[in-house]
């Protein structure tokens, strides 16, 4: 359970997280690319390029926010945040059933190509996912009280993984998972129950398909009746959207049933759960399970700023799951879709070392 005092401590920790932008979390760092990619004396060019491309994608289709949140989650929960989900090939993570509806690959490719033109082999695909997801969240949040866009700092310094196996996607939680089992799964990744509840705040901009809620609407636990915990008004509305005929299975439903907020990252999703308007069985169970119900209530009652800070903290914590920072274990891919061959990668790293030594010798002679 999560008491009011505990939640306030979480908020305080989130404020610390936002304030100390120069500190590191494990082997990751804030401002990792500072001095590593400079164009025309502009030192923050990496984040500017990512932000520009995400903004362009958002203007074309604002569902890119949910797409990137899902892409990041599915990457981090399988072998850690190493961009292994991006790799093409037979039997890679991308081909596994849970990932067949994952989107956002083209945007990551576009960003990578732009970055490679200005600073080749510098920015990892894993970091691109992290930065792009943060920027998408920022675009989907309301302005601050000062009237400015809300943005949080993310850590960088990840390297890309070299292995991707479809069989490893067993770590992804199925839609039928219980709250108890989900907590155990998150704990294996170093995330606690409160982290899990906050991360599910991403559902406020998410959707699901009618196929996944047919049983709740028509035959809950083989009773031939709807789920009694679902708001009756919602049942009627969803039955219109999801009739029993098989062809309706691909119709989409907003996971946040507040039509004024379904495209905004906020705490509306939790408020809907308290009204018994959770779409997925798992979502609604969060509001009744003894392990999570207090957290749901407190988040639903929190201010907009408190939710933003804590959601950001949970995102940053998830982005640090099993990351690769050792150059011997990971690499910086030239293309996010393929592992860079070892021979080329080793030769490239050696040439950089030679350039650095030449520069060091020149500087030494000038001192």
Image: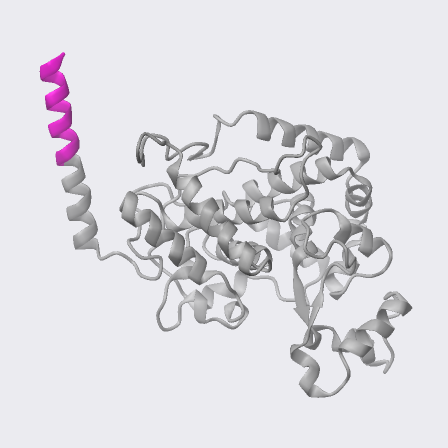
Q: Residue 362 lies in magenta, yes or no?
A: yes
Q: Is residue 133 left or right of residue 198?
A: left
Q: Residue furthest top?
A: 367
Q: How many marks?
A: 0
Residue 55 seen in the current view: yes
**Front-most of 114 and 320?**
114
Q: Residue at x 37, y 31 (%)?
A: 34
Residue 73 visible at all: no
273, 322: nearer the viewer = 273
Does residue 216 belong to the magenta stretch? Answer: no
Tell me if 305 is positioned left or right of 136 in this view.
right
Q: Which residues are magenta?
A: 354-367
Q: Where is the C terminus found, in terms of image quarters?
A: top left
Image-based side of 20 in relation to 39, left or right: right
Can you say which quadrant of the picture contains the N terminus?
top right
Residue at image location 67% in from the left, 52% down from the top: 200
Q: Quadrant of residue 62?
A: bottom right
Judge by depth and name the residue closer to the eye, 142 or 133. 142
Percent position of residue 48, x then y:
43, 40
Counting from the top left corner in percent of width and height, residue 286 is at: 77, 55
Q: Is 360 rendered above or below residue 348? A: above
15 shown above or below 165: above
**Residue 91, image x and y in percent?**
39, 72
Res 341 quadrant in image = bottom left
Residue 206: x and y in percent read 65, 60
What secondary structure predominates along the stretch shown in magenta?
A: helix
Front residue of 120 and 336: 120
- On the rendered structure, is 268 left or right of 206? right
């Amino acid at each position: 359970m999560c008491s009011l005092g505990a939640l306030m401590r979480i908020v305080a920790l989130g404020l610390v997280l936002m304030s100390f932008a120069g500190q590191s979390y494990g082997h990751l760092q804030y401002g990792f690319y500072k001095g590593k990619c400079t164009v025309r004396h502009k030192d923050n060019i990496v984040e500017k390029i990512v932000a520009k491309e995400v903004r362009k994608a958002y203007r074309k289709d604002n569902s890119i926010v949910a797409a990137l949140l899902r892409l990041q989650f599915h990457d981090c929960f399988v072998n850690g945040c190493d961009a292994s989900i991006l790799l093409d090939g037979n039997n890679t993570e991308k081909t596994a059933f849970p990932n067949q509806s994952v989107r956002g690959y083209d945007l990551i490719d576009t960003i990578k190509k732009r970055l490679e033109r200005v600073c080749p082999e510098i920015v990892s695909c894993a970091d691109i996912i992290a930065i792009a997801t943060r920027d998408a969240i920022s675009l989907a949040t309301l302005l601050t009280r000062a009237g400015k866009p809300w943005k949080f700092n993310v850590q960088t310094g990840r390297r890309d993984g070299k292995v991707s196996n479809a069989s490893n996607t067993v770590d992804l939680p199925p839609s039928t998972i219980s709250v108890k089992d989900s907590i155990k799964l998150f704990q294996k990744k170093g995330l606690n129950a409160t982290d899990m509840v906050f991360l599910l705040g991403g559902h406020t901009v998410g959707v699901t398909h009618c196929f996944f809620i047919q049983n709740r609407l028509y035959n809950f636990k083989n009773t031939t009746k709807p789920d009694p915990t679902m708001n009756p008004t919602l049942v009627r509305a969803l039955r219109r959207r999801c009739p029993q005929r098989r062809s309706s299975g691909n119709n989409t439903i907003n996971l946040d049933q507040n039509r004024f907020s379904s495209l905004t990252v906020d705490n509306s999703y939790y408020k809907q759960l308290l009204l018994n308007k959770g779409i997925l069985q798992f979502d609604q169970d969060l509001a009744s399970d003894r392990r999570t119900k207090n957290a749901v209530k407190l988040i639903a009652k929190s201010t907009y700023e408190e939710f933003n800070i804590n959601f950001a903290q949970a995102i940053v914590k998830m982005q640090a799951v099993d990351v690769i920072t050792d150059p011997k274990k990971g690499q910086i891919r030239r293309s996010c879709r393929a592992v860079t061959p070892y021979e080329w990668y080793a030769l490239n790293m050696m040439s950089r070392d030679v350039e650095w030594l030449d520069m060091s010798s020149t500087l030494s002679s000038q001192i």
